[in-house]
Image (cartoon, rainbow, N blue to C red):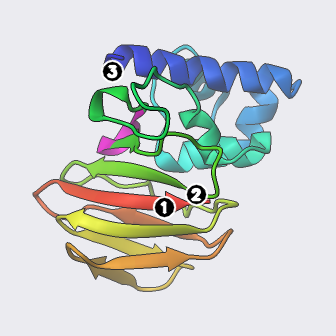
Amino acid sequence: MKMHEEVEALAILIHDLRKFKNLTLGELAERINRSVGFLSQVERGVSRPTVADLTAISEALGVSTAYFYNLSKPRSVSWVTRPHERRTLYLESGITDVLASPTIGGAFSMLDSHLEPGASSGELYLTDRSEQGCFVLEGELTVWLDHGDAVTLQANDCFQLHPHAQFRYANLTEKATRVLWVFN
């Protein structure tokens, strides 16, 4: 899919899940501490959520963040994904997440994240119901855990977080960063 199709598909998933959960735009906006106008723009594909927004939406709607990567594409081999077969989310703040796993239904899933220079998950700390690990493939990733000091990871460094850990991350360099997330 092209970028605008991926953005529209994410918008539809968020809208449909909110409706299924019988929530109004106002109720969901209040739960994620964002404006109704912003959420409406996200549901119409006009604005893109940040990583923090998507995590907050998933928590408020009672699903894993992985739910939003659930739009499958046809694959030549069911247990293999090739680059053109992967679901991609274009998030605000310069982050592009590509679902590398053939499915999100297994014991774990993998995301190939691309962070443009200056990209970040946002100023708010993320918390997700899944255990997560991250391996820095290229560049540098700065991570703040539980409101502590920043730790900068280089290529081939990795970390693992327990479920509901509070963290945020950013690429504070002038070069692109690429990381592999593994989560359950």
Look at 39% across and 25% down and name the residue there: 76
Category of crowding for the residue at label 3, using alpha-carbon neighbours closer than 10 angstroms: few (below 14), some (14–19), many (at least 20): few
- Assess whether mark 2 and mark 1 are in contact (beta carbons under 8 angstroms): yes
At x 75%, y 26%, the residue is 17
Residue type highlighted by circle 3: Met
Quick one: which residue is furthest to the bottom in this view?
A: 149
Image: magenta residue range: 88-95
Mark 3 against mark 2, which lies toward the viewer?
A: 2
Residue 41 image offset from top left, x and y in percent: 54, 19
Image coordinates for residue 11, horizontal then vertical, percent = 56, 21
Magenta segment's dominant SS is: strand
Quick check: 139 above or below 112?
Answer: below
Of residues 51 and 40, the one nearer the viewer is 51
Q: Mark 3 to mark 2: distance in Å?
A: 26 Å
- Reading the image, the residue beneath label 2 is 108
Calculate the distance from the C-alpha at mark 3 to the C-alpha at mark 1: 23 Å
SS for dot 2: loop
Density class for disc 2 (Cα within 10 Å; few <14, some 14-19, many ≥20) is some
Amino acid carrying label 1: it is: Val
Horizontally, residue 152 falls left or right of residue 18, namely left
Q: Which residue is mark 1?
A: 182
Task: Inspect the magenta stretch and tell me whether residue 89 lies in it.
Answer: yes
Question: Gap in Å between the C-alphas at discs 1 and 2?
Answer: 7 Å
In terms of secondary structure, where does tag 3 sit? helix
Identify the mark nearer the N-term, 1 or 2.
2
In the picture, which quadrant includes the C terminus?
A: bottom right
Q: Amino acid at mark 2?
A: Phe
Q: Which residue is label 3 attached to?
A: 3
